[in-house]
Structures are given as C-alpha cells and as structure tokens.
C-alpha cells in the first residue's frame, strides 16, 4: 500500500508539471531551442556554470534569441545547496507587429540564484530561486524566477545503472513592477545519462504569457567537466 501510494503521488506530481495549457495554446507556433549547460567543479566547493541557448521561432533557422550565461557558484553542503552569482548576455530578434521585419534588442543581465536538490525515493527534485537585474537597451528591470524540476528513472537495472529517465519542470517568472506576471514555462521530456559527465534530453515546452503562448521543442546537453 505504501509503494502504491508513493507511486500515485509521483504520478500526480509528474502530470502537474508535464501537462501544458492545451486550451490556451491553440494559436501558438512551434519553435526549437538548442541548449548547452555546462559545469566545472573547482576546489573547496566552488564551481563554474556556463550556458549557451540558441532559440528559433520556427523548427529551424529563424533566430529568436541567443543567450549566453556564466557564473561562479559555491556549495553550502557537499554537492548541494548551491549559491551562484552570474552574468548573462541576450540578443533578441523581435518581429515588429505582424510584419516580417525584425528589430534587435540587446540585454545584459546580472543574476543571483540558490539551487537545492532532494530525493523522494527514486524521484529527484530540484528547486531554483533566481533574482535578475536586467539592462534591456536603455531600460532597467528586475525579475524573480522559481523553478521546480523532477527526474524519474524509467529503468530498474540490477546494477543500479538507470540511464533512461523522464524529466519535467515548471518555472514561473514574476516582475517587480506591473504587470507582475511575466510568463510561465512547463516542460516534459525524456533524457539519457551517457556517463557522469554527459546527459542529453529531448522534450516539449509550453511558454505561457499574459495573453498568448508558444511551443518549443527543446534539445539539451548537460556536460560536467
């Protein structure tokens, strides 16, 4: 009974994170995000974070955004409870109204974040709290983000090596000024752990704004040096 109850809790949590806002995304278009996320462990709990995201409006070839991040982090406990100070550069190619013309927008971003991980049986949970100071051309903005992710192994190998897994997350973005709600991202996908240094994920993400939504196919590579 306990095992059954735990499985039901895990299934409910997974569905709540994976299921997108289908009724609100009928007019959304499909895009593609290619994402690289890397980390390097240094001595005495210090680590370096680096990230590249290449985002397209269409499935391929129509640049929406190029995002570069780097940060220096410190683990408060062994391999967990990470504090990080980072910098990001974002180049956005925004369409002008309903035309085919684009305008380039440059953004420099400073951010602070805290990430903590926990295990509930075979279920791995990740919480990330991020505060951003955004210099968007001549404007200054601030934003808070909360990320809740989960990872569920899909194999039960006798040697404990379970490389195939289900991944899901929900992240909400809140501005410090009106309108407070910025966006919400919901993601679900499958991943494969090739080694301790490399894993790949393929998934679907719905990004819901105040009045519209967009869909993306995400291809992600996570590399530990």
Image (cartoon, grey):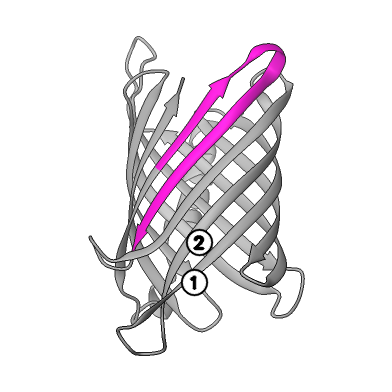
- Which span is picked out in magenta? 36-56
Taking the view exactly as shown, the residue that stands out farthest to the bottom is 98
Q: Which residue is mark 2?
A: 185
- Residue 160, placed above or below residue 115: above
Name the spot of residue 21 as percent of width and height, x first.
Answer: 44, 71
Say which residue appears at 73% left-offset and 80% top-offset. Answer: 178
Say which residue appears at 26% left-offset and 67% top-offset. Answer: 58
Determine whether, in the image, residue 4 is placed left or right of residue 175: left
Label 2 SS: strand
Taking the view exactly as shown, the residue that stands out farthest to the top is 159
Name the spot of residue 20 as percent of width and height, x first.
Answer: 42, 65
Label 1 SS: strand
Depth check: give the residue in front, 113 or 207.
113
- Residue 176, placed above or below residue 13: below
Predominant secondary structure, magenta span:
strand
Determine whether, in the image, residue 184 is placed left or right of residue 129: left
Say which residue appears at 52% left-offset and 28% top-offset. Answer: 39
Depth check: give the residue in front, 216 or 189.
216
Binning the other alpha carbons within 10 Å of mark 1 as few (below 14), some (14 to 19) or many (20 upward) gives many
Q: Is residue 60 magenta?
A: no
Say which residue appears at 40% left-offset and 79% top-offset. Answer: 23
Determine whether, in the image, residue 122 is placed left or right of residue 45: left
Name the spot of residue 131 as percent of width and height, x first.
Answer: 72, 53
Query: Which mark is drawn over residue 208?
Result: 1
Binning the other alpha carbons within 10 Å of mark 2 as few (below 14), some (14 to 19) or many (20 upward) gives many
Name the spot of residue 56 as percent of width and height, x first.
Answer: 32, 62
As measured in the structure, the alpha-carbon distance from the residue carrying label 2 to the one carrying label 1 is: 6 Å
Tell me which corner region of the image, top left, top right, bottom left or bottom right, holds residue 142.
bottom right
Depth check: give the residue in front, 193 or 96.
96
- Circles 2, 1 touching at the beta carbon (< 8 Å): yes
Depth check: give the residue in front, 125 or 122.
125
């Amino acid at each position: 009974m306990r095992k059954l109850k735990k499985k039901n809790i895990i299934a409910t949590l997974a569905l709540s994170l994976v299921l997108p806002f289908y009724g609100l995304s009928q007019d959304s278009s499909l895009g593609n995000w290619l994402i690289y996320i890397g980390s390097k462990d240094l001595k005495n709990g210090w680590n370096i974070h680096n990230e590249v995201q290449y985002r397209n409006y269409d499935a391929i070839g129509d640049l929406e955004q190029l995002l570069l991040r780097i940060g220096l982090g410190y683990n408060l406990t062994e391999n967990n409870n990470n504090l990080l100070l980072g910098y990001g550069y974002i180049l956005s190619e925004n369409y002008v109204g309903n035309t085919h013309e684009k305008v380039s927008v440059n953004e420099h971003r400073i951010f602070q974040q805290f990430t903590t991980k926990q295990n509930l049986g075979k279920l791995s949970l990740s919480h990330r709290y991020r505060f951003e100071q955004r210099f968007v051309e001549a404007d200054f903005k601030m934003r808070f983000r909360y990320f809740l992710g989960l990872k569920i192994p899909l194999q039960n190998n006798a040697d404990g090596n379970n490389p195939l897994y289900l991944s899901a997350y929900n992240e909400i973005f809140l501005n410090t000024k009106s309108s407070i709600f910025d966006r919400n991202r919901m993601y679900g996908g499958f991943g494969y752990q090739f080694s301790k240094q490399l894993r790949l994920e393929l998934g679907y993400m719905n990004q819901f704004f105040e009045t519209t939504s967009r869909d993306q196919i995400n291809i992600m590579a996570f590399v530990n040096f």
